[in-house]
Image (cartoon, grey):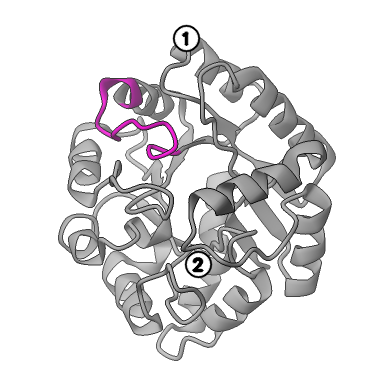
C-alpha cells in the first residue's frame, strides 16, 4: 500500500493555463510531470504503483472557498483512491462556520499556503484558522520554507515551532503537517526547531537528486526520519511538480530505513490520519 500525501490537480478547463501560470512565476521550476488534471494524476498513480493520493487545493484569494471545496467534495464522493483536503484563505469571512462545513462534509483537513496568500504563518488570521482546525479535529497541511515563486519565507521553522508550542489538538495528537521536510532551503532551522516536535513532516520536494529546487540529499532525508521518528513522516511527492514513480523508487531505495519504517511512511501514518 502506498499513499502520496501531497498532490495537486486543477479542473480540466483551467489546468493547462494554471500550470503555465505557475511555471512562468517560478522560472527555477523547469519540469512538470502531468497535465495537472484528475485523469492525469490517476494515470500517474497507476504507472507509479501508488494506491491513493491526497489532493491539496490552494485558495489564492478571498472568495474561492465555495468553488474550490465543491470541486474537492466531488472528488471525495466519486474517487475511492483520491482524498481531497479543503482549501481556505485567511481573508475569508466566517472562518469557524467554513471549517465546520468542511468537518461536517467529511474533509480530513485543510491546505494553507502562506506564500500564495502573502500572509505569515503567525498572522492572527492564520492563527484563527489553525486554532479552529485544532478544536474541530482537522489536520492542516502547510507549505513550509522557501517557494520558487517568492522571495519571502512566510512559514519559517522557528515560527512554526512557536505555533506548535502554543496550539494543541484536543487529543494531543499531531495535527499540523509541514510540507517539504519541514521547509525548503531552511534545513538547518528545521533541525533546530522542528525535529522531535509534535508535528508531521511530508517528504515532498526533498530529494536534491530528483530536482534542482530541492535542497536535501537522500542522506539528509534519512537523518530527518531517524531523528523526528518514522511515525511522524509522510510519503509525498508534490505531483505534478515531481514524478511519482521516480520519487517512490528513490524513497524505497533508501538503504538505512527499515522495512517497518518505510511501511509507516508509505501508508500507515497516512491511514491513521485519513481513518
Q: Secondary structure at mark 1?
A: loop
Q: Residue at x 21, y 45 (%)?
A: 161
Residue at the spot of label 2: 265
Q: Mark 2: few, some, or many residues within 10 Å (few <14, many ≥20)?
A: many
Q: Is residue 251 above or below residue 188?
A: below
Question: 216 and 5: which one is in front?
Answer: 216
Q: Left or right of 254: which side holds 12?
A: right
Q: Residue at x 24, y 53 (%)?
A: 197
Is the residue under label 2 in contact with that under label 1 (CB below 8 Å)? no
Residue at the spot of label 1: 93
- Image position, residue 225 (x, y; %): 35, 71
Residue occupying the far bottom of the picture: 255
The answer to whether residue 114 is magenta is yes
Q: Residue at x 37, y 75 (%)?
A: 221
Q: Mark 1: few, some, or many residues within 10 Å (few <14, many ≥20)?
A: few
User: Alpha-carbon distance for marks 1 and 2?
Assistant: 36 Å
- Image position, residue 133 (x, y; %): 43, 27
Q: Secondary structure at mark 2?
A: helix
Q: Left or right of 108: which side holds 137?
A: left
Q: Is residue 242 above or below residue 226?
A: above
- Image position, residue 236 (x, y; %): 54, 61
Q: Quadrant of the N terminus?
A: bottom right
Q: Is residue 168 above or below residue 147?
A: above
**Residues in magenta, as a range:** 113-126
- When asked about the image quadrant of residue 175, the answer is top left
- Image position, residue 196 (x, y; %): 24, 60
Q: Is residue 85 above or below residue 102?
A: below
Q: Left or right of 35: which side holds 85?
A: left
The answer to whether residue 167 is magenta is no
Q: Left or right of 125: which side holds 245?
A: right
Amino acid at each position: 500500500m502506498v499513499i502520496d500525501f501531497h498532490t495537486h490537480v486543477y479542473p480540466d478547463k483551467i489546468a493547462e493555463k494554471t500550470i503555465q501560470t505557475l511555471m512562468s512565476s517560478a522560472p527555477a521550476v523547469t519540469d512538470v510531470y502531468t497535465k495537472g488534471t484528475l485523469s492525469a494524476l490517476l494515470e500517474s498513480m497507476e504507472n507509479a504503483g501508488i494506491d491513493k493520493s491526497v489532493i491539496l487545493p490552494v485558495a489564492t484569494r478571498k472568495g474561492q472557498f465555495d468553488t474550490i471545496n465543491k470541486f474537492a467534495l466531488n472528488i471525495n464522493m466519486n474517487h475511492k483512491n483520491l482524498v481531497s483536503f479543503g482549501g481556505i484563505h485567511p481573508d475569508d469571512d466566517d472562518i469557524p462556520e467554513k471549517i465546520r462545513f468542511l468537518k461536517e462534509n467529511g474533509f480530513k483537513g485543510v491546505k494553507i499556503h502562506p506564500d500564495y496568500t502573502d500572509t505569515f504563518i503567525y498572522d492572527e488570521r492564520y492563527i484563527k484558522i489553525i486554532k479552529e482546525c485544532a478544536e474541530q479535529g482537522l489536520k492542516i497541511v502547510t507549505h513550509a520554507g522557501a517557494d520558487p515563486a517568492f522571495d519571502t519565507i512566510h512559514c519559517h521553522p522557528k515560527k512554526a515551532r512557536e505555533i506548535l508550542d502554543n496550539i494543541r489538538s484536543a487529543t494531543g495528537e499531531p495535527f499540523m503537517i509541514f510540507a517539504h521536510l519541514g521547509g525548503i532551503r531552511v534545513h538547518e532551522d528545521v533541525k533546530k526547531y522542528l525535529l522531535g516536535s509534535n508535528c508531521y513532516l511530508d517528504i515532498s520536494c526533498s530529494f536534491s537528486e530528483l530536482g534542482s529546487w530541492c535542497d536535501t540529499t537522500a542522506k539528509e532525508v534519512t537523518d530527518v526520519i531517524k531523528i523526528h521518528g518514522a511515525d511522524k513522516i509522510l510519503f509525498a511527492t508534490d505531483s505534478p511538480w515531481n514524478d511519482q514513480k521516480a520519487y517512490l523508487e528513490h524513497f524505497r531505495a533508501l538503504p538505512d530505513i527499515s522495512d517497518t519504517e518505510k511501511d509507516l511512511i508509505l501508508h500507515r501514518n497516512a491511514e491513521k490520519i485519513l481513518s
